[in-house]
Image (cartoon, grey):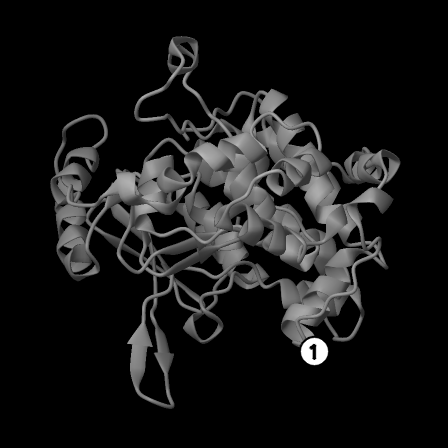
Amino acid sequence: MSHHFTTQFLPSRASNLGILHLNNPTSLNALTLDMIRSITSTLHQWTGTGLRATLMDAAPYENEKNGTTRPVFCAGGDVKAVYLAGKKKTSDDASLTSSFFREEYHLNHRIATQSIPQVSLWDGIVMGGGVGLSIHGKYRVATEHTVFAMPECKIGLFPDVGGSWWIPRLKVLYKESRHAEDAAAAVVGGVGNYLALTGARLKADDLMYAGIATHYVKSERLGELRKALIESTEGDDVGDCVAGVLMSFHDLSIDINGAFLSRNREEIDRAFHGKESVEDIVCALESMDSQFATSTLEIMRQMSPTSLKVTLEGLKRGSRLDTIGECLAMEYRIVQACMKEGSDFYEGIRAALVDKDGEPKWSPSSLEDVSMEMVESYFQNLGEDELCFVEGEISKL
């Protein structure tokens, strides 16, 4: 594989640590196809070179008007470019609607199954494609600046990049389960469905509570952490050389019991756990007399009804699949259906990123009008265009 270069991604190596630096800050480090190809070719070239771990971080956003900077990890994939290619409004090859996701999902799979740990520094916004670059790595470090979300239903898509693999497998336990059998079974509850269907924005305490982040480190200490991670890869010892370093920097002062997810856990589970349909979830929320239920209903009514139903179905199917590769192959079927002319994706991107009126006209416009047959059409086999992965590679998540 030849190396694909772009200034939007700057790889380097320090001792036996491979550093994957996202460098597209003017677009909040939005993931482009050039970046996907460059990261992929870099990881390929590093294979078998003695690396002990990889570190993914990102350039901060600089506001030229007021001279301020703010941290950002990756705000998602460059879906506007995909939109323009699909609408044939640019000179880009229309095949971007397939090649972008095909190559992105292959990169997600590579990160999930690589033999060395990846450490991702979630200092700032982490959304969509940025989640896919990092959630499948072994370690995810949140800071006080972290804002994490999978808001795809608001743009006519669905939580992809492996979301159908990790979201149904969130192991979120009650601090004190009321039922012994639930505690023994490691209660998962409704948190995953809630995150996927509402695009809820999570901060560090929520991410630690849900097990989405593995560590919490104050932003001011990230420089020290980078140096310590580099030094940890210099030895000849066998095994995970970064685990101890990360634990030594982990800030135990974070209060996960005060997190939004923790405080609203009972209502989240009552509405989102074990429901067979989005209508069942809405019905459960409507039966509750609380600010949480009211605000959640308001959020869900902004989403594409089709996306909501396809998302829930994808999560249910993903929970029954055996590998991340199978989940990504399923997601590729869904996303290619989303690329068809007239899908809610084009309306969602128009409203959010093109005309920016914030008023998408979904079709169908109500949950009741999205039939099971319509949902099923998003999961149809693509024949020769199916996404395939090497068998036997196991996710390290």
* Residue drawn where x is 19% and y is 41% of the image: 246
Residue 86 appears left or right of 246: right
Residue 51 in view, yes or no? no
**321 to 373, vertically: above or below:** above
* Residue drawn where x is 63% and y is 35% of the image: 284
* Residue 94 coordinates in the image, percent (x, y): 77, 63
Between 279 and 52, the one nearer to me in the picture? 279
Dot 1 falls on a residue whose secondary structure is loop
* Residue 68 coordinates in the image, percent (x, y): 30, 82
Between 16 and 180, the one nearer to me in the picture? 180
* Residue drawn where x is 33% and y is 70% of the image: 60
Name the residue tied to disc 1: 355
Between 19 and 368, the one nearer to me in the picture? 368
Q: Amino acid at mark 1?
A: Asp
Residue 289 appears left or right of 333: left
Residue 102 appears left or right of 55: right
The quarter of the picture where the C terminus appears is top left
- Which of the 4 image quarters holds residue 323? top right
Between 7 and 186, the one nearer to me in the picture? 186
* Residue drawn where x is 62% and y is 38% of the image: 287
* Residue 208 coordinates in the image, percent (x, y): 31, 40
Crowding at mark 1 (Cα within 10 Å: few <14, some 14-19, many 20+): few
Residue 136 in view, yes or no? yes
* Residue 10 coordinates in the image, percent (x, y): 37, 63
**234 to 66, vertically: above or below:** above
